[in-house]
Image (cartoon, rainbow, N blue to C red):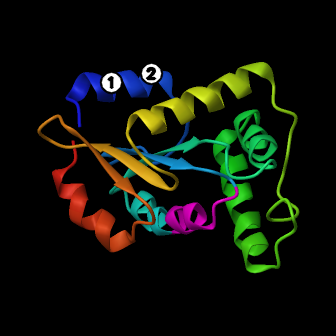
Amino acid sequence: MAQNNYWKDIGQQLTYIQEGHKGPVIYDFFDPNCPYCHGMYDEEQPLIKAGKLSVRYVPVAYLLPSSTPEAAAILQSPHRVQALQHFEGLAAKSFAAPMGPQGPVGLPQAKALPQTLHALKVNMAVLQSAHSMGVPAILYERKNGTTGLMPGMVSRGELLTIIPNLK
C-alpha cells in the first residue's frame, strides 16, 4: 500500500475511539452488527492491557439497518471509550442469543446526528480506499513507512507476530 502520507491522512480523516496509549497504533474497522468484529475486540484487549498495542476502533455502518443507530450510540456518547466497552459487553451476550430480524437485540441505539452520518460515510470511504471487502479489517503502519491491511478475523497470535514490525 501507499507510503506514510496515507497513514497521516487517514488519522486526520477517521472518527475513532482509541483504547490504549502504549505500543504501536492500529486502526480496527468494525460494524456493530459483525460478530467477528466483536471477536477481534476480545483478541485485542489483552494486548492493549499489556501495553503492547493501541487500537483505534473505527465504526462503519453497513451490515444491517440497526448498524447506524448503534454506531451513533457509541460515537455520540460523551464518554466514547466507556460506551464502546459497554456496547462490547452487551454485544457478547447478544451474539450468543438468537438474533432478531434486525440483528442482535438490546444493543444501545441513538438517532444519528448529521455529523455522525458524515463521519460514518468518511470511515467507510477510507475502508474502501484500503481495498477491504468487509469487516473486521485492520490497517497498520510498518516500520518502513508502508501501510498494511489485515482483512477478516485476526487472532491475538497473529497480532503478536506483526507487532514487532509496526511503527
Q: Position of residue 139 (x, y in %)?
A: 36, 45
Dividing the picture into quadrants, the one containing residue 162 is bottom left
Residue matched to label 1: 8
Mark 2 in CB contact with mark 1 (< 8 angstroms): yes
Q: Which residues are magenta?
A: 33-42
* Residue at screen point 60% across, 64% down: 38
* Residue at screen point 19% across, 37% down: 146
Q: Nearer the viewer, residue 144 or 128?
A: 128
Q: Nearer the viewer, residue 152 or 113?
A: 152
Q: Disc 1 residue type?
A: Lys
Left or right: 36 as drawn, with respect to 6: right
Q: Position of residue 106 (x, y in %)?
A: 88, 62
Which structural element holds mark 1?
helix
The answer to if 40 sits in the magenta stretch is: yes
Q: Disc 2 residue type?
A: Gln
Q: Crowding at label 1, few (<14), some or many (≥20) Cα neighbours within 10 Å?
A: few
* Residue at screen point 21% across, 41% down: 167
Which structural element holds mark 2?
helix
**Residue 152, disc:** none
Q: Position of residue 118 (x, y in %)?
A: 67, 22
Quarter of the rendering occupied by the N terminus = top left
Residue matched to label 2: 12
Whether residue 33 is visible, yes or no, is yes
Query: What is the spatial separation of the Cα atoms under label 2 and label 1, in whole angstroms?
Result: 7 Å
Classify 130 as above or below 96.
above
The answer to if 95 sits in the magenta stretch is: no
